Image (cartoon, coloured by chain):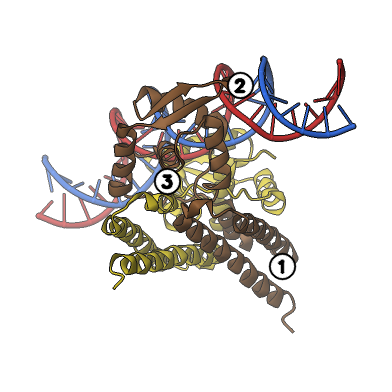
Chain colours: A yellow, B brown, C red, D blue
Amino acid sequence: MLAGMSLRIALLGLLSAVGPASGYDLAKKFEHSLNHVWQAGHTQIYPELVKMAADGLVEAEAEGARGRKTYTITAEGKRELHEWLAEHDPSMTIRSEPALQAFLLPLLDDPDQAIKVVERIRARYLARLEQLDCLPAEGSFGRYALSLGRAQVRTGLAWAEETLADLRKRRTPQ
Amino acid sequence: MLAGMSLRIALLGLLSAVGPASGYDLAKKFEHSLNHVWQAGHTQIYPELVKMAADGLVEAEAEGARGRKTYTITAEGKRELHEWLAEHDPSMTIRSEPALQAFLLPLLDDPDQAIKVVERIRARYLARLEQLDCLPAEGSFGRYALSLGRAQVRTGLAWAEETLADLRKRRTPQ
DNA sequence: GAGTTATATGTAAGTCCTGACATGTCAAGT
DNA sequence: ACTTGACATGTCAGGACTTACATATAACTC
């Protein structure tokens, strides 16, 4: 099993959880339930499903309306999915733009400028938290990931608020 | 200013913080101080520095030993760096393999299997936290990012421990 | 003097991912 | 009849990133 096949795994997981679905459906699910875990647009999903069908992990059923194609996970697909979940050591690779901005904060000598940057980061985290809070229970399927995602965003928000307090204290030390 | 130039920004930030450095130095800094924020290997860094030099963001000085080249940030480079930090709305894109595994957990009917998966995730977070705790103060330059990184990892760890407790309760409900 | 490790730089193939473009259907309102 | 918006699928160019390969010097150890 090769590394870096997370998009496949995510798609297989969705198909396994919600049953047969089209590429369009899967793109929507990505937006609404995998959003805090993994991201992918339809431009990545459609070609990937074709490759997965070629590899025997899913089966396509060309259906009626509007050229809609329904994909179903195969036994082989389920096997790959379970194997990945059971065996794969998850990569800790991180690429976080908010954290990169946090890293660079000391470059700004003017505390007011730094405050503006952290306030923008805070607003982003807050918007995302509200978005997560609006997520449907989704049959409670993604519950573990949702609690992890929420906790991570709340952590970012808390960091922003602590950092703002710290920067404001520095600005007016009297 | 285009999106997705974070590698450039990270390199400019390092050059701005620690002064002139070679590609090799920058690769080491990535490992030791940007690790919890952004990741890049030397195979990505060397070509990027060449492009950045072509764009006038850094200046290369071909130096002595072992073909070492020293790069210095230019005024234009500093301008770009500050502009990005001040203006760029950070992307919230997330791709977390641990979170993806968390998402898929309900697929495992056997609680013992789920426990194994979460224990592996927990071990990974723990290893990373120890790694972060060993980071030098680095002139305290990356202090904000370090506190954010640590908090994020601790959150992951706490999630793993709560989830383990939950799964163990389900296994033996008596 | 030989061997090992850390220093130091690169290339190339291939995959992953984004953003822009392109096409057409169906349902509902006006 | 017309328009708008949600549905539905795709391609393509280019940039980001990984993995494997390739090379050579300097310092240290045995």
Above or below: residue A70 compared with residue A150: above
Instruction: Judge from the rendering whether residue B40 lies leftward or rightward of residue A85; answer left or right.
Output: left
- Element type where label 3 sits in the image: helix
For badge 2, the amino acid type reads Arg
Amino acid on which disc 3 is placed: Tyr
**CA–CA distance in space, label 3 to label 1:** 33 Å
Viewer-nearest of labels 2 and 1?
A: 2
Residue under label 1 = B111
Q: How far apart, in angstroms, are the residues tagged by discs 2 and 1?
A: 56 Å
> Same chain for marks 2 and 1?
yes
What label sits on residue B66 in the rendered view? Answer: 2
Query: Up-down: is B5 above or below B86?
Result: above
Residue B115 coordinates in the image, percent (x, y): 71, 65
Q: Position of residue A3 (x, y in %)?
A: 64, 40
Mark 3 or mark 1, which is nearer to you? Answer: 1
Between residue C7 and residue A7, name the one nearer to us.
Answer: C7
Q: Amino acid at mark 1?
A: Pro
Q: Chain of mark 3?
A: A
Q: Earlier in the sequence, mark 2 or mark 1?
A: 2
Horizontally, residue D14 falls left or right of residue A92, namely left
- In the picture, the quarter occupied by the N terminus of chain B is top left
The chain under label 2 reads B
Q: Is residue B94 visible?
A: yes
Return the chain for callout 1: B
The residue sitting at 64% across, 70% down in the picture is B161
Distance in Å between CA atoms under marks 3 and 2: 54 Å
Mark 1 lies on a secondary structure that is: helix
Residue name at image x 47 percent, y 41 percent? A45
| Residue sticking out furthest to the bottom | B174
Residue indicated by mark 3: A24
**Residue C1: quadrant of the picture:** top right
Position of the C terminus of chain B, as image quadrant, is bottom right
